[in-house]
Image (cartoon, rainbow, N blue to C red):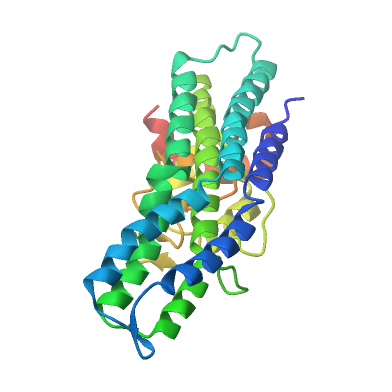
Amino acid sequence: MPDFNKIIREIKRSLSGFDKSIPALQDKLFKEMITEIKRLDTKGDNLAITVKNLSILTSIKNKLNRLILNKEYVAEIKEFAASFNEVYKLQFEYWKSIDNTFKPKPLLKAIRNQAVTDTVKSLTTQGISANVSDAIIGILRTNITSGGSYSDLAEQLRQSLTNTPESKGILDRYVKTVANDSIQQFNRQYTQIVSNDLGYTWFRYMNTDIETTRCFCDKMTDKNYFHVSEVPEILKGLGCDIYAKTKLPYGMIDGTNAENFFIRAGGWNCRHSINPVAERQVPKNIRDEVYATATYIAWKATK
């Protein structure tokens, strides 16, 4: 029997192995930044507003980038990028077990290659510089140009570069979000393309809920089975709070709609998979309930 859980397990494995060095790396960054800011001129406990202090920022940013993009981290990125090939292979095996005539479109290989390229860029110089190093330099620049307190600056760096029970450090948050979203969205995109080609209209929202699972994802895993015609109504939140800016449940990516929901799922850092299922696999009471709705009837009329 086809087992989509193999793909879910491979994604979990790749993610758990990738970010193991990040907490220690963040701690090292914090210690190095504390050393670096000792180079700044001060007046009492306040930073001096000088050209010299501002000129130091460029060398600090370069050091940040060098520290983050060390050999161990780069090797982990290379290993993580290889996991996209494994997911691609498992997807092929899954669909081949369902339909022995299945052959992946060239488009699927192109999507995989682009996903790997974009992920590596986001996790290396381009993404790290723009989303991590620039944020730290922004903290330094703001404090220097305002003549801020040296001790306050040190505390801001601690809050930004270390993990606490309340929040993760900036590097940890960024790297984990990029890694999770890149491989999860690639997997969902592959699934959506093949599902559309083969005419699947029923799906399951799968994966184990954890302590930080959002209300929307919690509701969806409880719902379990859903029909494609239900998606516009599902995006109204299933009773969860709606973020006024996006008009979507909290945590969802702005612009999520009935078409791209199958790729974006519950939003940033979502760990859930949307898996196609044959109509016969859906419990009869769920099918009957959906087929009796005006939404389904209207959807069916367009087919």
For image coordinates 58% across by 62% down, the residue present is 28
For image coordinates 52% across by 28% down, the residue present is 190
Vertical position of residue 4 compared to residue 125: above or below: above
Vertical position of residue 74 compared to residue 237: above or below: above
Visible in this render: residue 126?
yes
For image coordinates 67% across by 56% down, the residue present is 209
> Going by the image, does 233 lie left or right of 244?
right
Residue 13 is drawn in which quadrant?
top right
Quarter containing the C terminus: top left
For image coordinates 72% across by 33% down, the residue present is 6
User: In the image shown, does 16 or 195 lie closer to the viewer?
Assistant: 16
Residue 247 is drawn in which quadrant?
bottom left
Percent coordinates x, y for residue 103 in the rendering = 56, 11
Visible in this render: residue 235?
no
Percent coordinates x, y for residue 93 in the rendering = 67, 20
Q: Residue furthest bottom?
A: 44
Q: Residue furthest top?
A: 101
Q: Residue furthest right?
A: 1
Percent coordinates x, y for residue 218 in the rendering = 61, 58
User: In the image shown, does 81 or 256 lie closer to the viewer?
Assistant: 81
